[in-house]
Amino acid sequence: MKSIQQRKSLQQNSLVNHISFRNIGPTVMSGRVVDIEVNPSDATEFYVAYATGGLWHSTNNGQSFSPIFDSEDVLFIGDIAVNWQEKNRVIWVGTGEVNSSRSSYAGIGVYKSNNNGKSWEYLGLPESHHIGKIQLHPTDPNTAWVAVLGHLYSPNKERGVYKTTDGGKSWKQTLAIDENTGVVEMDINPANPNELYAATWYRTRRAWNFEEGGKTSGIYKSTDGGNTWNLLTTAGAGFPTGDNVGRIGVAVYPKNPQVVYAIVDNQNRRPDTAQRKADTSRYELKEFHNLTREKFLALEDRKIDSFIRRTSIPRKYTAKGIKELVANNQLKPTAIYDYLYNGDENSTPVIGAEVYRSNDGGRTWQKMNQKGLDLYSSFGYYFGKIYVSPSNENKVVILGIDLLASTDGGKTFKSIDRENVHADHHALWINPNRDGHMLNGNDGGLNITYDDGKNWSIANTPPVGQYYAINVDNARPYNVFGGLQDNGTWYGPSNHRENARWHVSGDYPFKSIGGGDGMQVQVDTRDNQTVYTGSQFGVYVRQNLRNRQDRRFIRPSNDLGEAAYRFNWQSPILLSPHHQDVLYFGTNRFHRSMNKGDTLPAISPDLTTSPQQGDVPYGTLTTISESPLKFGLIYTGTDDGNIHVSRDGGYNWTLISGKLPKGLWVSRVVASAYKEGRVYASLNGYRNDNFMPYLFVSDDYGTNWRSIAANLPFEPINVVKEDTRHDSLLYVGTDGGLYVTADAGRSYFAWTNGLPKSVPIHDLVIQQRENELVLGTHGRSLYIAKLDSVQLLMTNATYRKQKEAEVGKGQAVITPINKVPARKSKSNTEGAQLDGPSLTRKD
């Protein structure tokens, strides 16, 4: 909360906020929807809440939207609730989504508007972080309940159910389990508001491991308005119990509230079939673990060859050949296991989604689905919603990767997904007057159907793309490339202005060039056509935009005898600024290709701390930078806090992060374009629930570091970028916005004109020819601003006069920046002693 006040001060005192950013979209691929609220009297009016894109209002059935939450201090939403009976339209917003993914940002509690979003009142609950549900009393506007899931990456006691009876002025925690168990979902009996249901969820997440269930997950019921609660899902009630109960969703049938549905992510392993148990003709991975040489040589060749054909082991190997290498001590007897092991040797999948029904208000439960529901794949934590038609107790819809509907009370399901509906579903509304009319929110935005899912329309006009990384080319106009959360990789013109004219031709200006979760992009600017794009965990492709058939898969692969490479969710790639045939690629080792990625040998040892592995890849490279001044001067950063430098193209490496905070994600290392020994490093504590801004600079190749975080608010830093004309002018993107320093990090101001008040900036790129700064936001797509006025402002008399006034008030002296040609002059800030935040971790 103190950080928010600091951010406001940096916005109010900004020297550049008269310079506005322009949004260039794109909109067509949209971003993750977390909740939908529809006017029951007029279904053409509704609100759509996005995970990191804010709250939007439509009064014309989704043809257009207006943002109504952009003025507030946090853009991240978990749930919304609307009192449609109130004349002035009362809206409640619970900040911080509950889907527990890699980019599920924390909120600061609950907001309320009494005038349809024109103004907002903050209602507290700052330690809630992630809110699963706001449940309003059907007749008393002052009573509401909030389901608080709590911190994502650390334990906290402020989890559970909170109740207010005075419109949010005060709150009472009425259900609390423990510091790792929160409440993810709630529902109410509309005929008797004293009856409420709450779904608790035990889950812990760390950078290296996700524990997705526990014995404290269950369904609770209150019969006194949420003042006290009783556990329904006890042993013998018919509902799963024990250590492997994951996320739960609940839904009450309003016409007969004794009927309650629940969906649960059952993390118990699927039972082997009798046929599988009797099958001795094949080996499993675990059978290659902890083998002596004698035991390995005694294995059956036929079964080894069969195993090889079922895995990614190179086809050049056979059982006979591997045995010869093991016998001659050229391979370890555990080589097969070492090659394939990725943290889980047991390939048996979990049970996953199950649907249960109670006909007696939750006292007893019956499993309904007759067949397995392959709804969640391996990430049930990302879903967990179930809906029942307000007019048909047997019509049930469940949300996951697919969108499944049942008309027989959950016994059987069929997909109502269609080719123009994005996967990964998180929110649904069913019309109480016409249950074939539904609104569906997913990772690709909003869809609308009027015929039970036979046909869907798309309502994606808000610019809410969730970019991970961006880049630009040198075409005229130049293009902006970028990878988006679950929406692949796209590129489009920098002069784009969003409008509806493209519907006539069907030719949207932004084009898709890759699927999956879009990650980093590199562009060969010699032709502006050869691009390197990829998806999660290092699956990259080199392609030519003119000839889409010219595509080559590029990804480092280890050989037998080498441990499997570890790939980050966003594996880093970089084309050398000195020669764009040279491609760098990061796993847990550094790979260099001299032939555009055709071969990618590892030329470094493991550059991480080689940490203990969980079920999330960890101990991986996250960032690579090569000096624009010297070929082969390369820096790498890792997710476990290591920073290395190589001065010979990657053959030899020196650890240079020993004096920096330990164990934090290195979000950027950036080699300076002005001084050969200068390098910047930003550390991100998001995965530690540590919100300190860690930003450092070294002028001696990383031997010594000094903090340049100065007065930055407590927001994890994602990216730092040097200006191309001034060596002391830096741009910093955080989880809360964009900040600029004109004095090499002694002081910062915010640059927010044209942007939401708070938006996560994941990447920054400067197009040098046009002198434009491009922002890749994780929530509101792409923004561009000219830098000429910013750069001019740093040298004019107004700036100097303001700084002199600050000195007169007793503030620190800030030397005005001098304009210097890019990459030629030395910095005028060498030796400056820069103050920054304490390095004490604050969780």
Image (tube, rainbow, N blue to C red):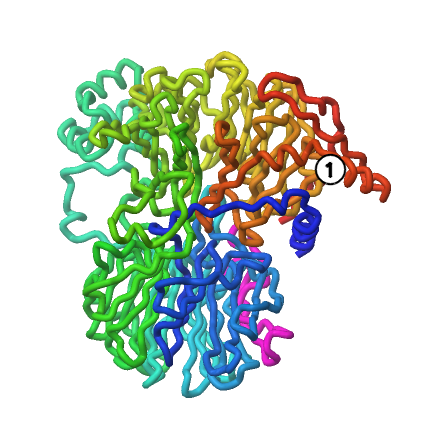
Q: Nearer the viewer, residue 65 or 329?
A: 65
Q: Position of residue 577 (x, y in %)?
A: 46, 20
Name the element at disc 1.
Answer: helix
The residue depicted at 42 percent of the width and 62 percent of the height is 65
Would residue 191 be counted in the magenta stretch? no
Q: Give the quarter of the image for residue 368.
A: bottom left
Q: Position of residue 714 (x, y in %)?
A: 64, 47
Question: Which residue matches tag 1?
Answer: 799
Left or right: 223, with 337 as reference point: right
Left or right: 571, with 294 as reference point: right
Left or right: 795, with 32 as reference point: right
Name the amino acid type tagged 1. Answer: Tyr
Tally of numbered discs: 1
Q: Position of residue 591 (x, y in %)?
A: 40, 21
Q: Main secondary structure of the magenta part?
A: loop
Left or right: 342, with 8 as reference point: left
Q: Nearer the viewer, residue 619 or 685?
A: 685
Which residues are the magenta region? 152-181
